[in-house]
Image (cartoon, rainbow, N blue to C red):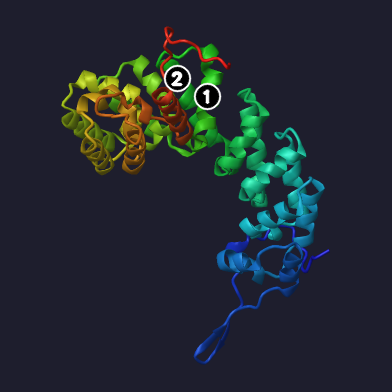
């Protein structure tokens, strides 16, 4: 058991209070030496010490560490040796959390995880979310209880805790305020109460960071969009399609983007609103980004009419568009006369569309009059 100093608090949260021991000599400064016992224990676990030294070298100079206890906790939950090594390389601060705190965290997380295997998977991807300050424990517990009152399933809550840990570390009142704002906004825009749980669950899953935004940002952005002509029904569609990113916008940036888009496309206000409804991402792209994407499409021979018909093509970077257009041209598909829809989607989506087009191009036509070939 590697325990050099007994402490009741996680040293990670005391980092601000712990300063390296400096011995001043003429023309030189000597830093506190590494904790060799900790280094050796990490070596035994196949941890790449060079990575730890490069990214979090201060951890190796702490006197109170719990290397064997941390490894034992993960091992008892089913983590393999390589997984333990990866966790400690990615988040070496884990060895500064005392065993009591780690056990408390394990108990807390198991209240929203289906199995220890699931928890290990979360720790492997988000170790900083599990190995947190002991002072966050009460807030985490209160926030879990709050989200359970919303009837969100455990999988959603654990995903929120993993991907947006700061929203669980802060006072529950702040999350309550944002959730109530989202719910009220949804209902005020005409959303049905029976569908609100599913809507909220999707929103939080797609963008858990919405919880960290200020309610006023949501109010201001929706007020701006209403002023430019969007109806309540359209605003509800935008709020759903933007996956909570509407809270990360601001009226001035949206005004500049909409003004530039309308002028570039040569469309009316009403036409622009329909384009935004098809491609809500248009709202949060800056003018320089849009200018580059318009330029790339026009250089490839695409017309403004085509862009207006398939505005989601603006979600793709210029490099991706150029690559896909070139690949389509390799077997004769000309985007200048065809639909831009084939350019859209993820890499997998494009490859599937590309494969279907190529197969259709290469497949020989069947002639019902031609005699069938038979073996003699």
Locate residue 7, reporting x and y percent. Answer: 75, 62
Q: Is residue 291 above or below residue 15?
A: above
Quadrant including the C terminus:
top right
Q: Is residue 226 above or below residue 8?
A: above
Relative to 304, 161 lies left or right? right
- Under circle 1, the secondary element is helix
Labelled disc at residue 200: 1
Residue 228 shows in this picture: no
Q: Is residue 32 left or right of residue 185?
A: right
Q: Which residue is mark 2?
A: 186
Depth check: 354 or 298 in front? 354
Front-most of 221 and 316? 316
The residue located at (70%, 73%) in the rendering is 35
Q: Quadrant of residue 72?
A: bottom right
Q: CA distance from mark 2 to mark 1?
A: 9 Å
| Residue 290 screen position, x and y as percent | 26, 38
């Amino acid at each position: 058991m590697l325990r050099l100093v007994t402490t009741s608090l996680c040293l990670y949260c005391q980092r601000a209070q712990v300063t390296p021991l400096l011995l001043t000599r003429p023309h030189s400064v000597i830093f506190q030496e590494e904790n060799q016992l900790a280094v050796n224990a990490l070596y035994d676990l196949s941890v790449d010490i060079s990575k730890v030294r490069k990214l979090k070298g201060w951890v190796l100079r702490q006197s109170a560490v719990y290397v064997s206890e941390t490894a034992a906790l993960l091992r008892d939950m089913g983590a393999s040796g390589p997984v333990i090594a990866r966790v400690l390389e990615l988040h070496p601060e884990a060895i500064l959390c005392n065993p009591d705190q780690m056990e408390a965290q394990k108990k807390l997380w198991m209240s929203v995880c289906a199995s220890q295997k699931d928890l290990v998977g979360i720790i492997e991807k988000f170790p900083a979310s599990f190995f947190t300050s002991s002072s966050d424990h009460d807030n985490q517990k209160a926030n879990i209880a709050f989200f359970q009152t919303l009837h969100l399933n455990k999988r959603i809550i654990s995903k929120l805790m993993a991907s947006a840990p700061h929203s669980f570390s802060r006072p529950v009142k702040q999350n309550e305020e944002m959730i109530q704002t989202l719910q009220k906004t949804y209902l005020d825009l005409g959303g049905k109460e029976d569908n609100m749980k599913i809507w909220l669950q999707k929103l939080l899953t797609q963008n858990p960071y919405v919880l960290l935004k200020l309610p006023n940002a949501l109010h201001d952005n929706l007020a701006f969009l209403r002023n430019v002509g969007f109806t309540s029904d359209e605003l509800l569609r935008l709020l759903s399609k933007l996956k909570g990113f509407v809270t990360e916008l601001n009226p001035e940036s949206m005004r500049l983007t909409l003004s530039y888009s309308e002028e570039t496309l040569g469309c009316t206000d009403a036409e622009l609103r329909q384009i935004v409804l098809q491609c809500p991402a248009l709202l949060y792209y800056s003018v320089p980004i849009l200018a580059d994407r318009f330029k790339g499409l026009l250089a490839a021979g695409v017309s403004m009419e085509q862009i207006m018909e398939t505005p989601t093509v603006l979600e793709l970077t210029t490099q991706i568009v150029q690559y896909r257009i070139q690949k389509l041209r390799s077997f004769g598909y000309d985007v200048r006369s065809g639909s831009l829809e084939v350019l859209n989607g993820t890499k997998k989506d494009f490859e599937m569309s590309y494969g279907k087009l190529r197969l259709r191009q290469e497949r020989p036509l069947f002639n019902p009059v031609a005699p069938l070939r038979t073996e003699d």
